[in-house]
Amino acid sequence: MTTIRTTVLPLIAAAGLAACGGTDRATTVTQVVTSKPSDIPTTTTLSKARAASIAQAALLSLDDMPVGWTAQAKEREARGSDDEKGCAETQGVPRSRGHAATDSFADGDGDVYVDQQVMVYADESEAVRAVNTYRTAAFRNCYEKFLVDRTEATAEGTDVVLEGVDAAELNIEPYGDDSFGLRFEVRTSEYGVVDSYFFDNAVVRAGALVSVLGARAAYSPVAADLRSEILQTVAGRLRSAMR
């Protein structure tokens, strides 16, 4: 349905899986430094500005997307109540010391959107704790509720009806030191016609860096080969940023 496709899909980029995790106000951050993926990481203290620079260096760019895609600024909404806080905040994901996010990258038809957030944590144990929090059933339930609330708010005053939201683990290849994915399918109907909208989230950790890739698509999931190609780039970018 046009109403849902042109509003909910872009808006999820503004408050997706890693939204509102927060950035620590501390002035230093510990970076994991490694010369190759198999090395045991060592640590070096960095300034807050350097932490943000590391996160920025790990981001995807429009050049990493297929030909014909465009970059669109994310829509921002005011946040106030607890219900408006992102699941990363309400479910206890550790606050990162450095954070950066891409614009939304959209295909030519506006049916597929991709965005990425990168968090630099105080040390590898904090990054592990963040990824493990994303894996919990409580976090999954929180994000599912977010999708329900956002879809119902968007459909208000229209003939669109939310039929349901299904959540499942997303099967992805191993990337970095740890990785996993979640897929949420939002089903809506209008005049008896049912459509599906897919919200894929892939989390990749390399040392103390964590990337969350969001891929949202109307009618059918984002192609697995496209997702794999982008995630390979993500893993390489994380490793390069660590050096």
Image (cartoon, helix red, strand yellow):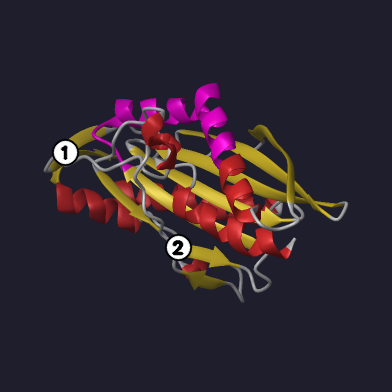
Q: Amino acid at mark 1?
A: Thr
Question: Which portion, as a residue range, is magenta?
Answer: 120-146
Residue drawn at 67 percent across, 32 percent down? 168
Q: Does the magenta stretch mainly form a helix, a strand or a loop?
A: helix
**Disc 1 vs disc 2: which is toward the camera?**
2
**Mark sitting earlier along the chain (1/2):** 1
Q: Is residue 52 left or right of residue 13?
A: left
Regarding residue 121, the answer to whether it shows in the image is yes
Q: Which mark is residue 71?
A: none
Judging from the image, what secondary structure is the residue with disc 2 in? loop
Camera-side residue of 26 and 79: 79
> In x, y percent, where is residue 217?
67, 56
Residue situated furthest top in the rendering: 137
At label 2, which amino acid type do we have? Lys
Mark 2, residue position: 74
Residue, disc 1? 44
Q: Which of 20/114 is in front?
A: 20
Eyeballing the image, is 145 above or below 74?
Answer: above
